[in-house]
Amino acid sequence: MDNINNAAIHFSIAGIAITLFQIVIIVACIFIVTKYRKSVGPKLLLVGSLLCLMATLANSILPLFNSFQDSDMDFLKFQVMVTYFNMFAFLVFTLGFFIFAINDLKKSE
């Protein structure tokens, strides 16, 4: 039982750290969006980072409601759904970063 409690503590610490890092990324994206207001790239960076934060919070908070207590398969389906949502969020962030790097950073040189 002690090992499971230790693992839960470590997962909680990692989850808090990941959430804090994502908030820092969101703040940085807000600064970039305010500097490059007319560009699509920074806006996609911000949207992608917000979606990533939503996926992280859903993955951390929703299992606490014990709605998956009856079925491991329901929990597995939820994990797959959140993973695909997170993949989409990273795709949006990556496209935004790519557009920002190609278009906006070239203009500022």
Image (cartoon, rainbow, N blue to C red):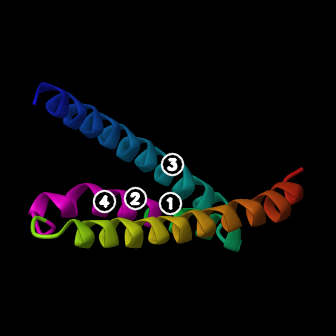
In the shown orientation, is residue 71 left or right of residue 80?
A: left
Q: Nearer the viewer, mark 2 or mark 4?
A: 4
Calculate the distance from the C-alpha at mark 3 to the C-alpha at mark 1.
Answer: 7 Å
Residue at point 32%, 43% (across, down): 15
Type of the residue with mark 1: Ser
- Residue at image location 36% in from the left, 47% down from the top: 19
x and y percent of residue 31 in the render? 56, 53
Q: Main secondary structure of the magenta part?
A: helix
Q: Nearer the viewer, residue 32 or 60?
A: 60
Q: Is residue 40 left or right of residue 71?
A: right
The amino acid type found where label 4 is placed reads Asn
Q: Of helix, strand and loop, which one carries label 1?
A: helix
Q: Position of residue 51 (x, y in %)?
A: 45, 67
Magenta residues span 51-68
Q: Which residue is mark 2?
A: 53
> Dots 3 and 1: beta carbons under 8 Å?
yes
Q: Which mark is residue 25?
A: 3
Whether residue 101 appears in magenta in the rendering, the answer is no
Do labels 2 and 1 touch, CB within 8 Å?
yes
Label whose residue precedes the other's in the sequence (4 or 1): 1
Label drawn at residue 49: 1
First in sequence: mark 3 vs mark 4: 3
Q: Look at the numbered disc 2 and give the secondary structure of its residue.
A: helix
Report crowding for label 4: few under 14, some 14 to 19, many 20 or more residues within 10 A (C-alpha). Answer: some
Q: Earlier in the sequence, mark 2 or mark 3?
A: 3
Measure the C-alpha gap from mark 2 to mark 3.
10 Å
